[in-house]
């Protein structure tokens, strides 16, 4: 089962305050544990919402809204994508995330929708298109890795 863990933003992360060397080292150790356990598929931190935008759809039309966005507690500051055996395993990993004594933040754990979750609307033709797209994504990732090596 794939899950996505979202680290929610804080006032500091939204203000662009970068973590200390110690906090970065602790998070690096945590991420190394995830890699060593073979559960980490992807993960990164995000810039504050002031550097982002939302594309809002109403009546089928898109409107761009530039950040920053008001509800800090609803924003995402970083994420991990894990491959785990269960929701409970994902929660156990989330509970191991490093947090300083004064830290206050939330990590939201959500399962990723898999093909079998989509029901009969995900026809064999659409499944085949999805598979081709995922193969292309993988080739693109490999190309990016090669370019950055």
Image (cartoon, rainbow, N blue to C red):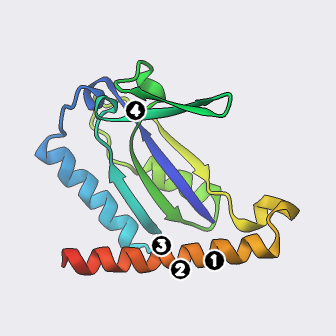
Residue topped by disc 4 = 105
State the quadrant of the N terminus.
bottom right
Q: Nearer the viewer, residue 55 or 44?
A: 55
The numbered mark at residue 135 is: 2
Report whether 135 appears left or right of 58: left
- Up/down of 126 relative to 102, above or below: below
Mark 2 is surrounded, within 10 Å at the Cα level, by few (under 14), some (14 to 19) or many (20 or more) other residues, namely few
For the point 47% across and 56% down, the residue is 93
Label 1 secondary element: helix
CB within 8 Å, label 4 to label 3: no
Q: Which quadrant of the view contains residue 112?
A: bottom right
Identify which residue is drawn at 15% across, 46% down: 22
Horizontal relation, residue 125 to residue 109: left or right: right
Instruction: Residue at 21%, 31% (x, y): give it.
Output: 16
Q: Position of residue 19 (x, y in %)?
A: 19, 40
Of tags 4 and 1, the one toward the viewer is 1
């Amino acid at each position: 089962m794939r899950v996505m863990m979202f680290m929610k933003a804080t006032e500091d992360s939204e203000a662009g305050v970068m973590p200390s060397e110690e906090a970065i080292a602790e998070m690096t150790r945590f991420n190394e544990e995830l890699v060593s356990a073979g559960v980490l598929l992807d993960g990164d931190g995000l810039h504050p919402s002031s550097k982002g935008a939302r594309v809002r759809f109403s009546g089928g039309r898109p409107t761009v809204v530039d950040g920053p966005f008001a509800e800090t507690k609803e924003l995402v500051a970083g994420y991990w994508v894990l491959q785990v055996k269960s929701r409970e395993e994902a929660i156990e990993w989330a509970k191991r995330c490093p947090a300083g004594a004064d830290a206050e933040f939330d990590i939201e754990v959500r399962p990723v929708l898999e093909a079998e979750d989509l029901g009969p609307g995900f026809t064999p033709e659409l499944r085949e298109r999805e598979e081709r797209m995922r193969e292309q994504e993988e080739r693109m990732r490999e190309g990016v890795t090669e370019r950055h090596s």
